Structure formats: structure tokens, C-alpha cells
Image: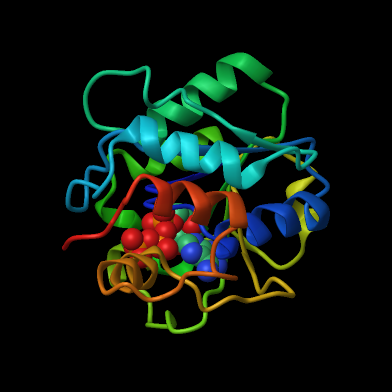
Amino acid sequence: MLGGTFDPVHLGHLRSALELLEILALDRVHMIPAKMPPLRDTPRVAPEERLALLRLGIGDTPGLVADPRELERDGPSYSADTLASLRAEYGDQARLIMALGHDAFLRLAEWHAPWRLFELAHLVVIDRPDFEAALPRALAELIEGREVDSPGALMQRPAGRLLRLALPTRMAISATEIRRRLASDRSVRFLVPEAVEARILANSLYRHR
Ligand code: ATP
């Protein structure tokens, strides 16, 4: 699972998802837009539109799935609930992985029921250029004894371990920068897939701050 606001989806998300698929030998990556992200401002664009952009971005890429399950649930989008529904679908023995960027990982101890995440899945943290701060104490305690140093170590159990990964293509692309560019009429070409750019421009999304 790679959850996010996807406001909008960009090549940093998509390239990371694809590399995770290959490096971790996954069957698929569920990319799951949050309807209501609990820890951040309301997204600029409605959940259904963010999902539509995600679908366009993924296109026919094998192994990547635009998953609407958080849009179908009422209330805040807690990842623990999302992982529980994936666990129910795939069964107790399936290896489940929740991937997140280092910026999101730094706030993990503030999430709803963070220990539940490790009961339900392994966590894989993706290095991001520009996000390299030290770990807060509560986070260090949460992950104590869980860290492993290779994808192979995630194979032995269905959940509970933490792996930090520097993916081959680290991309300094953020949705914040894309929204800024669009708000000031600058190009987002080669930062988002062409079909995503076309829909954003056709629907005048993110034009005004
Ligand atoms: P914003 O700038 O609005 O905070 P974002 O670009 O970080 O957005 P999110 O939708 O918040 O995008 O990200 C979803 C997940 O993907 C998060 O775990 C985030 O850390 C990760 N992610 C986002 N951009 C990248 C990137 N360029 N490389 C690797 N991971 C990324």
C-alpha cells in the first residue's frame, strides 16, 4: 500500500511505486488516496478528482492499482483501518507492506494507533531528497527492535518489520511544488504524467491559491 493525498499524483509517487514493486517483489501496489487526511489541511481538490488523476497517472502500468477504498469509508482516513481491510482481503499469511516517504514517516508516532500498523504490515520508508531530519524520540521508541536491513528480511513474516530504502531514482518532486507552479501559471511538464497534466489544465485545477 502506498497511501497519500495525491494532490495531485506526480512522477515521484509513480516511479517510487514501480521501484517498490520490483525491489520488494510485490504482486501489486495499491495506491490509495486519502479522503480526509487526519494530519494535514483539507486537500485542494475533491477526493474523486484526485482519484481520477491517479487513475490517469497509472494508466495501464502493470502492478499499480488506483484503490478507492478510503473514499468509500466515512470519517477520517486512518491507515490502520485501510491496512485492516487489506489484511481481511489477502488473509493472515500474506506479506503486507505499507510504504511511505521519510517526511511522512517522521510524523508516524502522531498517527492514529501507530502500533497497529506494525501488527498489520511491514513498514518501508522511502528516502526523499530534502527530507532528512533526525527521528523524534516517540518514533524511535515505536520502531525499536523492528528495523531490518534488506528486502529479504521482510519475506520471513507477514508484518512487523521496518526497512528504510534508498530507491535508485530519488526524485525531488512534491505535490506542494506542483500546486505552487500551477497557481502561478508555470509548467508542470515532466513532473506529472502527460495525461495528468492535460486533465489539470483542461479543468483549471490548482489555478488559484
Ligand atoms: P505534499 O507536497 O502536498 O505534502 P507529497 O508530494 O508529499 O505532497 P503525498 O500525497 O503527501 O505527496 O505523498 C504520498 C506518499 O508518497 C507519502 O508517503 C510521501 O512521503 C511519498 N512521496 C511523495 N513524493 C515522493 C517522492 N518524490 N519520492 C518518494 N516518495 C514520495
Q: In which quarter of the image is residue 141?
A: bottom left
Q: Which of 144 and 42 is in front in this view?
A: 42
Q: In which quarter of the image is the C terminus?
A: bottom left
Q: Residue at x 58, y 41 (%)?
A: 56
Residue 23, quarter of the rendered image: bottom right
Q: Quadrant of the N terminus?
A: top right
Question: Is 100 or 12 nearer to us in this picture?
Answer: 12
Q: Which residue is drawn at 80% across and 39% down?
A: 62
Residue visible at 82% across and 53% down in the picture: 22
206 shown above or below 59: below
Give the colour scheme shown. rainbow
* Residue 48 location (% of width, % of height): 37, 30
Task: In the rendered view, tell whether residue 199 sits above or below residue 185.
Answer: above
| Image: 84 above or below 65 | above
Residue 151 percent across, percent down from the top left: 77, 58
Residue 113 x/y as whole percent: 31, 38
Q: Return the residue nearer the eye: 169 or 190.
A: 190
Residue 57 to residue 36: above or below: below
